[in-house]
Image: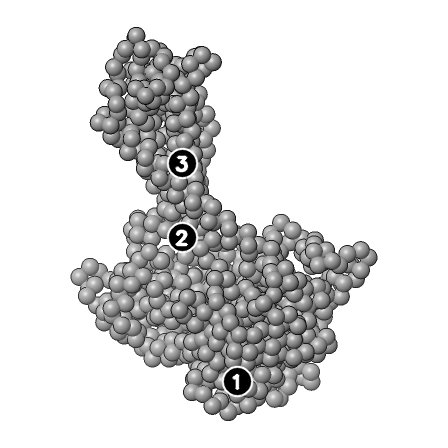
Amino acid sequence: MIEVRDLQVRYGERTVARVPELDVREGECVAIVGESGSGKSTTLLSLLGLTEGAHVSGRVRVCGVDVLQATPRRLREIRGARVALVMQSPQAALSPATRLGTLMRRALKLHGVGGGRVEQVMRDAVEAVMLEHRILRRYPHEISGGQAQRFAIALAIALGAEVILADEPTSALDVTVQAEVVGVLRRLREERGLALLLVSHDLALVSTIADRVLVMKDGEVVEAGPAAVVLAEPSHPYTRELLEALP
Amino acid sequence: MKGPGAQALDVPLRRTLPRITDRLALLGAALLALITLAAVLAPWLAPYPADRLDPVLGLTPPSAEHWFGTDSLGRDLFTRVMHGGRTSLFIAVAVLVLSAGVGVTLGVVAGYAGGWIRDVIMRITDVFLAFPALLLSVALAVVLGPSVTTVIVAIAVTWWPWYTRLAASMAASIATRGYVDAARCLGVPAPLIILRHVLPNSLTPVLVQISLDAGGVILIAAALSYLGVGAQEPTAEWGLMVGQSQTLFTTNWWAVTFPGLAILVTAFAFNVLGEGLRSALDPRSVRT
Amino acid sequence: MTMLRAEGVTLGYGGTPVVHDVSLDITEGGVGLIGESGSGKTTLARAFLGLLTPMSGNIWYGDQTLKKADQRRFRKDVQPVFQAEALDPRMRIGGSVAEGLPRDERHRVPELLRQVGLDPELAERRPHQLSGGQRQRVVIARALAVGPRLLILDEPTSALDVTVQARILDLLASLDTERLLITHNLAVVGRLCRTSHVLFAGRVVEAGATAELLDRPAHPYTLALRDAVPKLGGRPPVARGRTEARPAETGCAFRLRCPLAVAACERAPALRETAGRQVACHRAEDVLDGLSGVREREDVPDG
């Protein structure tokens, strides 16, 4: 679903992210781990062509589309529909005076889903993230952070996303709520074969959900491999430092 | 740029908008610099003395000697418009300094203190907001006699409550910040907290509002002079000039048009500058 | 004798209580106050700092209520450490650190910065020129300036990167002060607090030795909190009960979220002594016994 080779993101003279290799297959969860300024979020955004003002080189294929060569129109087709981006605080992106149901219906229409199927698609999506159907009648400010995050995922499901790119999706949430959101993401992976690329600073969380891990520091990938191996026998001192920092 | 779907639409739009306002704001700043310079240096730069009468040359159309033409008393309009800027800008500055000074002081106190202090101050602003500026000025003109001072007092009296409201809402939000709580826990007295933390951090939107308002003040001042309760002859003032010459519009268009344009351009310049400041200082447009 | 103590404190804003009848001693060895957002933990902290007056009950400072106590002494004794955002964005670092110092003691700023592990030259900078970890250290230095005996720590590390977080925790642990730590992060409490109080919907639902609570929770909410924390190489975090259920208005506030709720839970449980801790739950014994389906052995954290 995602295939990255020799990705390099530069702002002017400064290289902010360099990723030699990154693959995410169907039903797989790959995590990019690092601290602020490591280039992990930049890497994620570059996969959707969202790094404005940056010079991006290399080869990036997402759902069969060559992102770096694609026209803006082609990019818009995969963004939202086949690839969904879930950020730390989705509430900020929800129009405050619009009910969630209306919002989802509009998004579906924009991507060409209309007519009788709409209600069924919406119901399925909301159920898939374990929200109650009546949440569609609420306004964004009436729901909690965890519900908003799950609604963002539901929106992705409704639009038929095959890949979810998630940037710190749970770090603003309480642990109990985080557990729910992570549970939803795991189920979607198992039941629908969703591919998941997760950016996080939380190694413990990553260790419980990711198949493979990339550790980034100062824009470079310092270690990569199966999660079990990297976290049990880290070879790079920085990975060890991250692990020791866990409380 | 958060959440799925939405970002695809708003990225290109948000990219282009700030650029346009930036250029307009620069234009506004440049215009204002020009107008201020012309007004301040009018006694030295103007081609003729401000009050030189020349009945023979009354109401001549624009020409090489008189760029904007002359008025019915034969005074050079270009000179008058430059001098008029002195009066209009002085009124604007005086009104804004007075009303912002009073308004912001009361506002930050109300916002920081909250409770009954806030309630009392806010009720007072309500009372003043109930006065229509124009009506109050006419009444004041009767009491004080029509003059520039009357205009300043009349506008300032109805103008300050807006700054109180703005400053109060800013200050109330600043008052909940961690650094204000920390200062309280360190035993810093309330007046010092207001001066050191609340005031400086509440000021930005007020400054933006002031530059947006300046245009409005000039318009109202012009309207008051036009109505005859403001500046009086022989003081040059844009609104007064428009008022005196309005009957001549069909026959001698320049006598009304140039002072009117001066009002319009100045108000426009203040507005675009204010908008530019607003978008430049708004964290939402800087970040993300 | 503890320095600061809450006795039957009810707190609220605009007449609506958000903390109900809480009694809590800030004892030696660090006290943790654990809860989710909306649990009332920060409100309680503000009351301990004298920033909020209780609707009923008292905060005791030594043998006097906070209202009657000597404010100057109290302000020197008890200081907050808020999140790193708690710095005036327009003020230089040196100015922020010196805020609590009398004029003739301003020369201590470099020494204070050094004490929290910062380069004294940072005094000339402004907050946005510092990293999150450095800002947090400045916040700590500002509090230490007046020589407090008790620090009220409100989520001091939750906005920081893990490696930075670890170093800030080391710094806090090395300080020679008592502490009340407010957090939603159970792992952090384990390091800094000998005893802990778990707060749900403004009420203490379980209180006791931190190690005991984490090892063998007696309240289903403590259990849910603990099992939601992801553990390195462990099973995925477990979500117990639905978090979106609102606290119940009557009876046990947790019952609408509780997987163990029974009819008896419509009666509000009182805080009572069991297994060496205080707990407010009718089914505490069942939770302690590891009722099948409630807890799994492999979930017990090591250490």
User: Which label was assigned to residue A224?
Assistant: 1
Query: Residue at the spot x=62%, y=88% of the render?
Result: C297
Helix, strand or loop for disc 3: helix
Residue A80 to residue C271: above or below: above
Give coordinates of residue B131: x percent, y percent.
Answer: 45, 26
Q: Nearer the viewer, residue A181 or C213?
A: A181
Going by the picture, which residue comes out furthest to the bottom? A233
Q: Quadrant of the N terminus of chain C?
A: bottom left
- Say which residue label 2 marks: B175
Query: Residue at the spot x=41%, y=66% of the render?
Result: A12
Helix, strand or loop for disc 1: strand
Mark 2 residue type: Ala
Q: Is residue C280 visible?
A: no
User: Which label was assigned to residue B269?
Assistant: 3
Q: Nearer the viewer, residue A43 or C55?
A: A43
Q: Are marks 2 and 1 on the same chain?
A: no
| Mark 2 → mark 3, Cα distance in angstroms | 34 Å
Query: Residue at the spot x=66%, y=72% of the render?
Result: A63
User: How many neighbours does mark 2 have within 10 angstroms: few (below 14), some (14-19), or many (20 or more)?
Assistant: many
Query: Residue at the spot x=30%, y=15% of the render?
Result: B75
Q: Please state the chain letter of the residue tagged with numbered disc 3 in the rendered image.
A: B
Q: Nearer the viewer, residue C198 or A210?
A: A210
